[in-house]
Image (cartoon, rainbow, N blue to C red):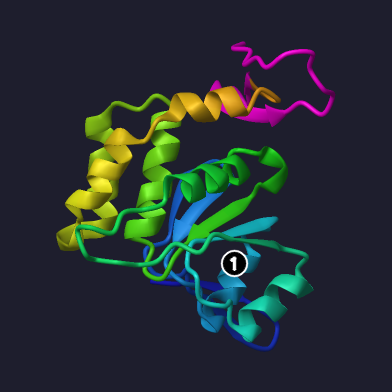
C-alpha cells in the first residue's frame, strides 16, 4: 500500500520496496528496489546502500544512486539453498562494520527478496546489540516466513560478535537522541593508543 503525495500537476504514489521495514533509527531493510520504488527511497534521504548479492547492480539503480550521492557497498553473498552452503562469516563481518558506522546512515540493507541474506545480517546486528536469541530468531522468521532456513538460524546463533567488538576499537557507545535513550554508535576519528570499547 503506497502513500499519495499531492503535487500541483500530478499525484505521486510512494511505493516501498518489497519486505521494507525500519530496523532502527536510520537503518532500513528491504528486497531489491525497483525503479517504481525510487520516489519512496527519496523520502529516506539515504546516504548508503548495503547490497548483499554478487550480481552487478542494474544501471538504472546505479544512476539513481549517483544522482543522489548515495554510496553503494556491495558484499557478494551467494543466495544458496543447499544445507552445505553457508553464509561467509568474514563477509558478514565486513558488512557489519559498514552498517554500524553512523557516517553511512541513513542506510538501506537489501538482497534480492530481503529475507535470508538481509535477515542474517540484521540477525548478527541484533546479537551485537545484545538481543536475546529468541527475539533475533523471531525477527528473522517474521521476514522469511515459510521460507525460513535452519542454516541461517544456525549461522546467526554461532556468529561470534566478540571478534567484531575487538576489531572496532574506534567505535564508542553513546546514549543520545530526542529523549529516547536509544543506543547509537559514534565513530571516533582520533586514533586511540590501544584498542578499547567505551560504554557510556
* Name of the residue lying farthest toward the left: 146
Within the image, what quadrant is residue 159 found in? top left
Toward the right, the furthest residue is 190
Start-end of magenta stretch: 173-200
Question: Vertically, is 191 above or below 72?
Answer: above
Q: Residue at x 41, y 55 (%)?
A: 118
- Expressed as whole percent of the image width and height from the top left, the position of residue 17 reads 45, 70
- Locate residue 142, reporting x and y percent: 24, 51
Q: Quadrant of the N terminus?
A: bottom left
Q: Residue at x 70, y 71 (%)?
A: 65
- Of residues 189 and 103, the one drawn nearer to the viewer in this rendering: 189
- Residues 85 and 126: in front is 85
The vertical placement of 17 against 63, above or below, is above
Residue plotted at (77% across, 74% down):
67
Crowding near pointer 1: few (<14 within 10 Å), some, many (20+)? some
The front one of 39 and 170 is: 170
Q: Residue at x 53, y 75 (%)?
A: 37
- Quarter holding the C terminus? top right
Residue 189 magenta-drawn? yes
**What residue is shown with label 1?**
41
Q: Residue furthest bottom?
A: 9
What count of labels does the image hold? 1
Please indicate, yes or no, whether residue 180 appears anywhere in the rendered image: no
Instruction: Name above or below for residue 7 compared with residue 73.
Output: below
What secondary structure predominates along the stretch shown in magenta? loop
| Circle 1: element type | helix
Residue 126 lies in what quarter of the image? top left
Left or right position of 168 against 79? right
The image quadrant of residue 78 is bottom left
The spot of residue 63 in percent (x, y) is 71, 80
Q: Is residue 144 visible?
A: yes
Amino acid at each position: 500500500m503506497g502513500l499519495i503525495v499531492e503535487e500541483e500537476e500530478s499525484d505521486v504514489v510512494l511505493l516501498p520496496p518489497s519486505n521494507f521495514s525500519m530496523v532502527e533509527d536510520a537503518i532500513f531493510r528491504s528486497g531489491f528496489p525497483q525503479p517504481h520504488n525510487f520516489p519512496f527511497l527519496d523520502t529516506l534521504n539515504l546516504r548508503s546502500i548495503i547490497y548483499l548479492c554478487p550480481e552487478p547492480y542494474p544501471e538504472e539503480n546505479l544512476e539513481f544512486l549517483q544522482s543522489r550521492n548515495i554510496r553503494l557497498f556491495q558484499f557478494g553473498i551467494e543466495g544458496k539453498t543447499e544445507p552445505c552452503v553457508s553464509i561467509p562469516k568474514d563477509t558478514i563481518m565486513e558488512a557489519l562494520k559498514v552498517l554500524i558506522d553512523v557516517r553511512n546512515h541513513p542506510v538501506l540493507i537489501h538482497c534480492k527478496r530481503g529475507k535470508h541474506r538481509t535477515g542474517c545480517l540484521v540477525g548478527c546486528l541484533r546479537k551485537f546489540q545484545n538481543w536475546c536469541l529468541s527475539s533475533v530468531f523471531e525477527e528473522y522468521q517474521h521476514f522469511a516466513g515459510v521460507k525460513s532456513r535452519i542454516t541461517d538460524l544456525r549461522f546467526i546463533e554461532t556468529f561470534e560478535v566478540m571478534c567484531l567488538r575487538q576489531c572496532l576499537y574506534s567505535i564508542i557507545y553513546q546514549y543520545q537522541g530526542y529523549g529516547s535513550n536509544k543506543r547509537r554508535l559514534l565513530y571516533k576519528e582520533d586514533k586511540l593508543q590501544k584498542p578499547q570499547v567505551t560504554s557510556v
